[in-house]
Image (cartoon, rainbow, N blue to C red):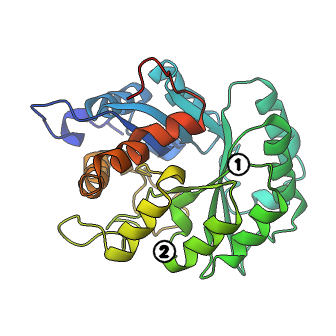
Amino acid sequence: MALVSIAACSVPQQDTPTAFADIHLHYNYTHDEIMTPHDAVKILRQHNIVLATVSSEPTYFALKLSAAGEGWILPFASPYYKAGNRLNWYFDKHLLEALRERLATGKYRGIGEVHITAGIGPRRDNPVFVGLIKLAEEFSLPFLIHTDSDRHEFFLSICKKYPDVRFIWAHAGGTLQPASLAPLMQQCANVWLDLAGRDPDHYDQLADNDGSLLPDWRNFIIDYQDRIMTGTDPVWNAFQIYRWYEADEGWQHYADFIGFHRRWLATLPPAVQHKIQLHNARLFFDLVDTKTEN
């Protein structure tokens, strides 16, 4: 299959956009079929992404994108460490050993993205899932968790049980709204929100058609501005849970994803915008240079 030209994946801009931290990237084998790591990095540079995280299936593909970025793309170790185990990883007796070996290299800066779904699996007491959280605690790494549930209590029991683990809650709970998010943020100081995927092509419900934040979201984001980050989640179509049978053209939509987030961020007070767009991520990953940070 021919590789995609990056020219079709970006929007020419006369002015350099403000620096941005994209803390939710994927570079899976289904992306690699049509987009090289270097072309993906070119897209990120075109949009002035200066810090990013990436998780992949299989997990070593995150290292490929990180290497192409030469240091500013932080790879996460995914439980999907080999192709084909996305749906049954929590039954894999070898997974924890395999992840421990990878973490011991020092190459990975976090664990995730880890998906758990209420009523489907894994159970919150599943030994493999619990083992992953304990690995995050042992190696002092953040844990990117994706929960599919219609109530925040599903995750609340996890973040309260492991207060020493720093969780990034992918997509801010997916379909959950501010009224459900606030109680968890109040009770779990170890949770940061990731607003990636809260866009019209994924979960929606964050902003109206002109990009303005909905009132409840605006108030919530300002209230918790110090613990919110965002990113793009470049997968397509996100509503298909497992697309092993076809290439993923998500990177071709990167300009739309990042553009959506820039639009709603621009409606916030400048100091809040800067925190969510860049500063919080630098703080979270201990990458702030006090001499240059503004």
Q: How many marks?
A: 2
For the point 75% across and 62% down, the residue is 159
From the viewer's perspective, is residue 54 above or below residue 161? above
> Which residue is rendered at x = 45% and y = 38% of the image?
279
- Amino acid carrying label 1: it is Arg
Residue at position x 67%, y 39% in the image: 110
Indicate which disc residue 178 carries: 2
Question: Residue 96 is drawn in which quadrant?
Answer: top right
Q: Nearer the viewer, residue 39 or 206?
A: 206
In the rendered view, does 123 fall on the left or right side of 270? right
Q: Earlier in the sequence, mark 1 or mark 2?
A: 1
Residue at disc 1, secondary structure: loop
Question: x%, y% of residue 244?
Answer: 54, 56
| Residue 12: image tag | none
Say the numbered circle drawn on residue 166: 1
- Horizontal and vertical percent position of residue 101: 83, 31
Q: How far apart are marks 1 and 2 (CA)?
A: 21 Å
